Each structure stands twice: as C-alpha cells, then as structure tokens.
Amino acid sequence: MYMDNLSEEKKELIEELGVYFETSEDMSPLSARIFSLLVLSEINGITFDTIVETLEASKSSTSTNLQLLQTSGIVSYCTKPGDRKRYFKVDPKHIVTRLEKKIEMWEKERKLHLKVSDFKIKLHKQQNTFSETLPGIQFAKNYSLFIEDVIKNLKNLKEKTSTLINEEQS
Amino acid sequence: MYMDNLSEEKKELIEELGVYFETSEDMSPLSARIFSLLVLSEINGITFDTIVETLEASKSSTSTNLQLLQTSGIVSYCTKPGDRKRYFKVDPKHIVTRLEKKIEMWEKERKLHLKVSDFKIKLHKQQNTFSETLPGIQFAKNYSLFIEDVIKNLKNLKEKTSTLINEEQS
DNA sequence: CGTTTAGTTCGGTTATTAGCGAACTAAAAG
DNA sequence: CTTTTAGTTCGCTAATAACCGAACTAAACG
C-alpha cells in the first residue's frame, strides 16, 4: 500500500540517517535516531509516545535523549490548546545554529593548520632545510586557501538561510 | 634555551593536535598523539623508543596503536643500513589518501542529503503541501550547491597535491 | 650459544557509554 | 479524591574502549 511503502522507506531512512548523525554529529545511537525521525517528520512535531513507538525505545531512554537534544538546542517542542502532549520537532533555529557551528569548526581547523605549518617552517629554518618550494610548504598554502574558500561559502550559505527564514516569518 | 622552547612548544602542539585528531579523525587518544608526533617530526621518521619516551606511553600500547595506524595506511616506516630500528613516519601517500577519503565522505553526505530532501518532497506532495518556495526546499538546494562546491575544490586540491608529490619524486 | 635489542602478544583492569525497568511526580480528568 | 496521562529520575547492567605490565619472540651481537 501507498502509506506502507512510505513508512517503510521512512524507517530505513531513519536508520541510515541515524548512523550518519551518530558519527558525524557525535550523537548517541538513540539521540541520532530521534533526531532523524524528527527531521523526516512533519514540521508541526510528533508526540513522545510516537517517538517511543516508532523507535521501539524505552520511555526512560527517550526522555533522557530528548532532554539532551533540547539542551543542545537541536530539538524544541510546541503545545496545542486543550492537549497536554508536547509536540517535539527540530528547533527552527537549529539549521542556522548548525551552520554557525560548522563555521567555527572550520575556523578552528584553519588556526590549528596555520599553527602546525608555522611550527614546521620554524623547525626547517632551524635545521637550515627550509625552502619555499618544499612540497609540504606548498600543500600547506593550498590547503589554507581551500579552508578559506569553504568558510566563505559557509558564511554565504548562512546568510542566504537566515534571510530565507526571516522571509518565511513575515 | 632555544631547543627547550621548541620541544616545549612541540609537546603542547602534540596535545592540541591530538585532541583534534581524536574527534575529527576518530582515533584513540594514543593513536592521535602518535600521529601528531609524527606530523610534527622530521620527515625521515622517528624510532619506536622515541615515541614511547616522548609520549610517556607503554611499549605495548605504542605497538598496538602503531600497527593500527599502519594498517590504516596512515603511518609507514623505513630502515637504515646497519640499523635494526624502524623509523616511523607519516605515510607519504597519506595526504592524498586522506583527501580522497574526504571527497568520499562529502559525496556520501551529498547522496544522503538528496535522499532526505527527495523523501520530504514526496511527503509534501502526498499531503498536498508542496511548494517550490518552501524555505526547506530552498535550503536543500543551496546546501546541495555548497556540497558540490566543496567537492569540486577538494578534487582540485587533490590534483594539485598529486602533481606536487610527483614533481618532488622526479 | 647466551644475551641484548626491538618490538609483539596476551590477559587483565578501569572507565565510560548507552540503554533498560521500576518507582516516582505533577497536572488534569473523572 | 482517586485515577490517568505524560513524562522524569534513579539505580543497575551489559558492552566496549583504552591502556598497562609481564611474558614472549625473532633477529643479531658478542
């Protein structure tokens, strides 16, 4: 059936995305799955019980991981009048926050890379083996340019996304 | 003294780089420190004992982690005539291999991202809430372009680096 | 052949992670 | 006021990671 195919596909995607977030965003398995489920669900949010049922996890672990995700600013919830349940969803601010974090990470990598290549230049000079044409020195320069380009593109993407979200709200 | 400042700086950099590799390259603490030490040491390599002494690690752990690094193609060693010791160093092929792995990772992220946004479009269409101007759809497109740009730059960097290394060898 | 050198392998210890069930709580419903 | 709902908190357990020391090995030195 139509709906069954979709939810089957959803379940598979949750696992695939889950594995991805586990490593790339350094989340616990359950956190990664909760996050994946929310990413793939409607924007209005889903209930605690839906999460417990679809992920076949315990209430306790679900609660703990949901709190972790909320304090990290990844997940938030909204409520509906006359309904005691919370509707959990990906925090609307999260896309931009995540881009900001990525920018920070790359800037950190850039600084560290510079520190390392400065150190190696100092070492080479001390041993009188320094030359501008050393492949290590050349690579360091190219890599530096690469990082700067990624950062530039990320900042651009962040700006675009911010205006996109602001337009939506108006 | 001159040498002391340098080695002091080196020790600090090993720790800093170590922490970085631990998380970003998903290495065990000791593997990350061995790799950092090799990155910051002369290109000809350093001995097993030097590693054990500078990192204040046990011979057993050093051995295990060196083997791990070698089977991952990150570290290799060379020998000197009339000298039983191995001189461990960063594998010369490793820079290019690492770039290749990064390209693969980004390509994987790109595919997954496409899969997710296709799924969400399908969901929207099924619920009749699809529109080209949805911010989520717009962001997905921008992000896709960003990833493609990163991949393009990485491939470019890889080519440059390969020729750099080939020139060196000739 | 016995000893040193240069590592390797094995068994064990400790710390951390990730989840679970059971008991709990605070608000609302009956 | 009792019961249900919607989660939360706590204590425990199983799995895994990361390292260590001690015993081992294989080549080479004397």
Image (tube, coloured by chain):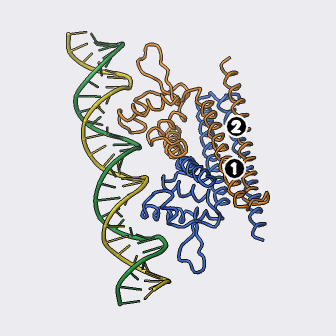
Chain colours: A orange, B blue, C green, D yellow
B124 to the left or right of A22: right
Q: Is residue A125 left or right of residue D9?
A: right
Residue linked to disc 1 = A118
Task: For marks 2 and 1, give the CA distance.
Answer: 26 Å
C8 lies left or right of A96: left
Numbered disc 2: secondary structure: helix
Q: Nearer the viewer, residue A115 or B143?
A: A115
- Give x and y (percent) for residue C7: 47, 70
| Chain designation of label 2 | A
Picture residue at 66% right of the left edge, 59% below the top = B95
**Amino acid type indicated by mark 2:** Leu
Q: Residues within 10 Å of mark 2 (few under 14, many from 20)?
A: many
User: What kind of residue is marked 1?
Assistant: Asp
Of the two numbered discs 2 and 1 on the same chain, state the one appearing first in sequence: 1
User: Does mark 1 fall on the same chain as mark 2?
Assistant: yes
Q: Looking at the image, which residue is at 64% across and 62% down?
A: B42
Q: Nearer the viewer, mark 2 or mark 1?
A: 1
Examine the rendered structure and indicate whether residue B127 appears above or below residue B118.
above
The one nearer the camera, D16 or B167, is B167
Name the residue beneath numbered marker 2: A154
**SS of the residue under disc 1:** helix
Direction front: furthest residue: B1
- x and y percentages locating residue A107 in the rendered image: 66, 39
Residue at position x 39%, y 39% in the image: A56
Residue B153 against residue C10 in the figure, above or below:
above
Q: Residues within 10 Å of mark 1 (few under 14, many from 20)?
A: some
Chain identity of mark 1? A
Disc assigned to residue B25: none
- Tell me the quarter of the picture where residue B155 sits: bottom right
